[in-house]
Amino acid sequence: MVWQQIYDPFGNPVLSTAMAATPVVVVMLASLAFFISRHTWPHCWPWVRLC
């Protein structure tokens, strides 16, 4: 059995590339949000061991 690969599932190269990049962009933005929130916490509260 031969499987056919579709490199342009939406029929538009720009749309296909944007949809393929969506998970990567979401993970990068989530990582950035975590990094920013981690470094903007009130630093070194005695009961918070994140410092």
Image: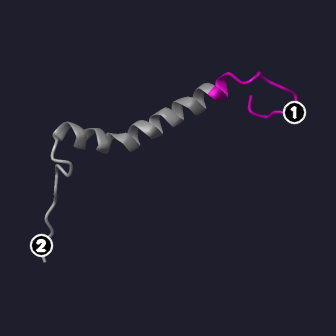
Amino acid type of the residue that numbered disc 2 sits on in the rendered structure:
Val
Which structural element holds mark 1? loop
On screen, 30 above or below 1? above
Q: Residues within 10 Å of mark 1 (few under 14, many from 20)?
A: few
Residue that protrudes farthest toward the bottom in the picture? 1
Amino acid type of the residue that numbered disc 1 sits on in the rendered structure:
Trp
**Residue 2 vs residue 15: left or right?**
left
Comparing marks 2 and 1, which lies closer to the viewer?
2
Q: Which mark is residue 47?
A: 1
Q: Earlier in the sequence, mark 2 or mark 1?
A: 2
Q: Which SS does the magenta portion mostly show?
A: loop
Residue 44: x percent and y percent? 80, 24
Residue 5: x percent and y percent? 16, 60
Residue 24: x percent and y percent? 39, 40
The quarter of the rendered structure image containing the C terminus is: top right
Tell me the residue that label 2 is attached to: 2
Q: Residue at x 24, y 40 (%)?
A: 15
The CA span between labels 2 and 1 is 60 Å
In magenta, the rendered stretch is: 37-51
Circle 2/circle 1 CB separation < 8 Å: no
